[in-house]
Amino acid sequence: MENFVILKETKELHGCYRVGDYFLVNMKNALGKIATLCRNWREGEMDLLKLSKFQLQLRALISEVHHLKERDQSASKQLQLLVQKQKKAEEETNKKLADLQAELVVSNELQQKLERKVNCLESENALLENRQKDLKETINNLLQSRESFVKAYEDSTCEMKRAMESRDRMILFLSEKIKSHSLLVNSIEKEASSIKQIVNDTQYILTEKEEAAVKLKKKLHEIATFEKLFIGITS
């Protein structure tokens, strides 16, 4: 906007120069006409009608000269004002230019700082990318290890399941065996008990027979003694 105002004032200044040039040209033309009229008047070539026209033209020229003088004075004043404005505008422009140069220096410094920060950020970004790459590799390795562990766990679980099923079958088989052995032991115990009872009964019978044999032997001994006594008595 300020540049537009300066450009406009510069155009007005050129316009004032053009007004001054126009004034000088018209003054020359007017003076030439006056000189021609005066020359004709001196030579007596003018009648009353021409004299009236001459007076009118002279008045018009004088009025035009006054008007041109006023315009020239106004243009001079405007020219001075415009020159002052232009100087002031140039001073302000130079000041603003200096301020802009200072701002440009500050901006360049800020740009350099920002470039350094950008370089630092790029370096940090590169480090982060490398870390991210390492983390991805670590995660992939962990996932692979997890898959291997899960597979091994599933395999071991299947083996344990098969082993447990085999153990259950073995336990069932052993339970059946123990049950059958228990039944056999019970049967053997019953048979042993009956055999023991038979043995006890037999032992009791043998004891009774032994006692009967002892009694019989005692009786036989008594009989033999009686026979000996009887034989001795009879003889």
Image (cartoon, rainbow, N blue to C red):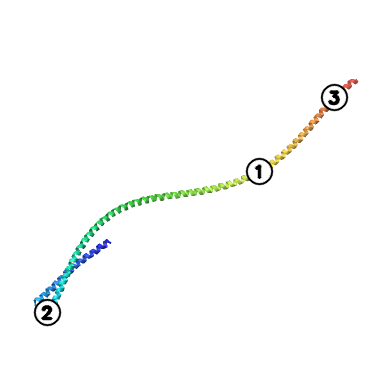
**What secondary structure is found at the residue carrying circle 1?**
helix
In x, y percent, where is residue 123? 37, 50
Q: Amino acid at mark 1?
A: Ser
- Camera-nearest residue between 84 and 112: 84
Nearer to us of marks 1 and 2 is 2
Q: Counting residues from the N terminus, which is met first, the one under dot 1 or under dot 2?
A: 2
Q: CA distance from mark 1 to mark 3?
A: 68 Å
In x, y percent, where is residue 16? 20, 66
For the point 48% across and 48% down, the residue is 142
- Camera-nearest residue between 86 and 59: 59
How many marks do you count on the picture? 3
In-image side of 125 versus 196 (left or right):
left
For the point 66% across and 43% down, the residue is 175
Q: Amino acid at mark 3?
A: Glu
Residue placed under numbered mark 3 in the picture: 222
User: Within the image, what quadrant is residue 41 found in?
Assistant: bottom left
In-image side of 218 versus 93 (left or right):
right
| Disc marking residue 175 | 1
Q: Amino acid at mark 2?
A: Leu
For the point 76% across and 34% down, the residue is 200
**What secondary structure is found at the residue carrying circle 3?**
helix
Residue placed under numbered mark 2 in the picture: 48
109 in relation to 230, above or below: below
| Disc marking residue 191 | none
